Amino acid sequence: MTTQAAEGLRDRKKRQTRRALGHAAVRLVAERGLDHVTVEDISAAADVSPRTFFNYFASKEDAVLGPDPDAGPRMRARVLSQPARLSAAAAVREALLAEVAAEPADDREHWLLRMRVVQQHPVLLARVFSGGEALERDLVEAIAERVGLPADDTYPLLLGAAAGAAFRVAVTRWSSTAAASLHDLFAEALDLIAAGLADPPRKP
């Protein structure tokens, strides 16, 4: 086995373990409530040790929410790697849709269950907002770098916020529209935004 193949296998196994822990955490908290689930419970349900659990998550709350520490840098790289001929809005569209497409297609029920769990626990809801803000900052910085503007300029801030709003709208619709995929609903929302967000004017 080549080094590259071995690394691919290790990465795949890590994703599988992370996913198993996240699914177990959401399922148990949905059944028992957050206060009645421990790290040991989640580890046992995922058939790993508590020590392994902490290789992936800092707490049971993190396991429920499933934050991906690589999501921000990966999203930034996706935006910056889009062809130069694309507008900033189009680059963001392609990057974010690629990110959504990378999610397992069979995760719909898990997503919806996690949404219900988060809505039932204010502490989780607050952490969702915090994590969303951090991802949006990464996106804004990528947009700013792409268009050559400061990260606190109106254009990158507005496009980043609009993309975040598009995702939230898509998830809301997806939760009640079984016939449509999250990818398609997100694409629809981003297309509506892109129709009104051309590239910013170049400053002299």
Image (spheres, grey):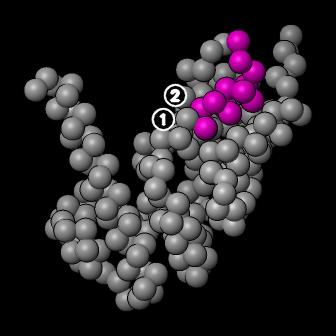
Q: Which residue is mark 1?
A: 74
Side (left or right) of 61 relative to 202: left
| 74 on left or right of 141 | left
Give how far across and how far down residue 100 sits, in percent: 55, 44
The quarter in which the N terminus is drawn is top left
- Residue 48 lies in quadrant: bottom left
Quarter of the image where the C terminus is located: top right
Mark 2 closeness class: few <14, some 14–19, many ≥20 residues within 10 Å: some
Describe the element under mark 1 as helix, strand or loop.
helix
Residue at (67%, 53%) from the top-left corner? 180
Q: Quadrant of residue 129?
A: bottom right
Q: Residue at x 55, y 35 (%)?
A: 98
Q: Residue furthest left?
A: 1
Task: Tell me whether the residue at label 2 lies in contact with that at label 1, contact meaning CB atoms closer than 8 angstroms.
Answer: yes
Using residue 130 as the reference point, say whether residue 28 is left or right of it. Answer: left
- The label number, if any, that marks residue 77 in the structure image: 2
Identify the magenta region.
Answer: 85-97
Considering only vertical position in the picture, is 133 above or below 191? Answer: below
Q: Is residue 33 visible?
A: yes
Q: Is residue 136 left or right of residue 39?
A: right
Nearer to me, 6 or 49: 6
